[in-house]
Image (cartoon, helix red, strand yellow):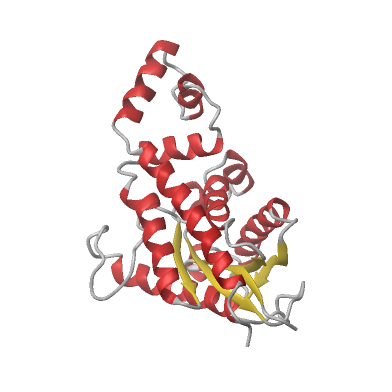
Amino acid sequence: MQKEAALFVYIDISNSRTIFSAMSEGTAILNYFADMLNTAYKDILITPFSIKDGDAIVGGVRDFTPLLHIYSNCLTHYYSEDFKTSFKHLPAVQNKTLNFYFGAGIGYIDTQSDNINIVNGTSIINAIEASNIAKTITKSQTNQKKSAVSNNENYFFAKQPFKFYCLADSQSFGNVVNALFFLAFEQLIRSDKQQQLFRVKDEHPEYSNIEIGMEMGYNTLSKADISSRISVLMANSDYYLYTKVRQDIIHFLVDLQKIMKGAPND
């Protein structure tokens, strides 16, 4: 079989053995995200997302460009009322201490299959290794300055519950992805309110300032006050630079897909 360029994602729950009282609790959360991703990307799935190794899910698509949307989708659902309601009995969900290691693997697959235990290739290997690197970075940086990249480590995603890392067959490509994701999801977001604002605008780009404010919980204020607060929040944020970086991520992934599809298959 000719190799096929693919993106695989491996999402591992952080400290799953200590934050849950039973393994079934972690399994339910993993199935929640697997079902969401399989529904959202059913038309481009190579291997549906399913549980692997007990405390992680892995799946793959044949297009690199959804990587940004997959990551954003995970964040959106993590903060959604549906997720909080579905798992309201779990303290880690309610107090937002539930974290994940999000490993993105860019490469090729040698054997295509719906069964995650059969499919193989550099893409899935890279995804698993990327998740392990995200874990190493997180554990080594937790007690250090949150924004620092030190001790020869990589980008530490302190603000996001999904700790991101990307590995590619040519790691210079993966490093570009890591840098752009770090800029978008860490450096350009300076407060919890800005993070909430960006999430709402990403999910509902058509919303007015008043609708954004209502979504952010300013329901008790007058419409004029809501609009004013959102205007000030926007003016003090780097939202438009954030959207530019997101566009650049997509453009880079489109070009990378073309490069790797044109690469010789050994």
Where, quadrant-wise, is the C terminus in this rendering?
bottom right
Q: Quadrant of residue 3?
A: bottom right
- The residue shown at (50%, 22%) is 208
Q: Position of residue 201 (x, y in %)?
A: 49, 34
Question: Would residue 94 be visible to someone looking at this image?
Answer: yes
Image x and y of residue 257, in percent: 57, 65
Question: Which of 123 and 94 lies nearest the eye of the viewer?
Answer: 123
| Residue that appears at 33% across and 39% down | 238
Snapshot quadrant of residue 154: bottom left
Quarter of the rendering containing residue 10: bottom right
Picture mark count: 0
Residue 218 position (above or below residue 133): above
For the N terminus, the quadrant is: bottom right
Instruction: Name the residue rendered at 40%, 41% in the picture.
Output: 195
Is 126 drawn above or below residue 227 in the view shown? below
In the image, 167 versus 14, the foreground residue is 167
Q: Nearer the viewer, residue 49 or 92?
A: 49
Above or below: residue 206 compared with residue 30: above
Closest to the observer, 228 or 205? 205
* Percent position of residue 99, x then y: 47, 59
259 left or right of 241? Answer: right
- Name which residue lies at 50% across and 78% down: 169
Q: Residue furthest bottom?
A: 266
Residue 234 drawn at (x, y percent):
35, 29
Q: Is residue 95 visible?
A: no
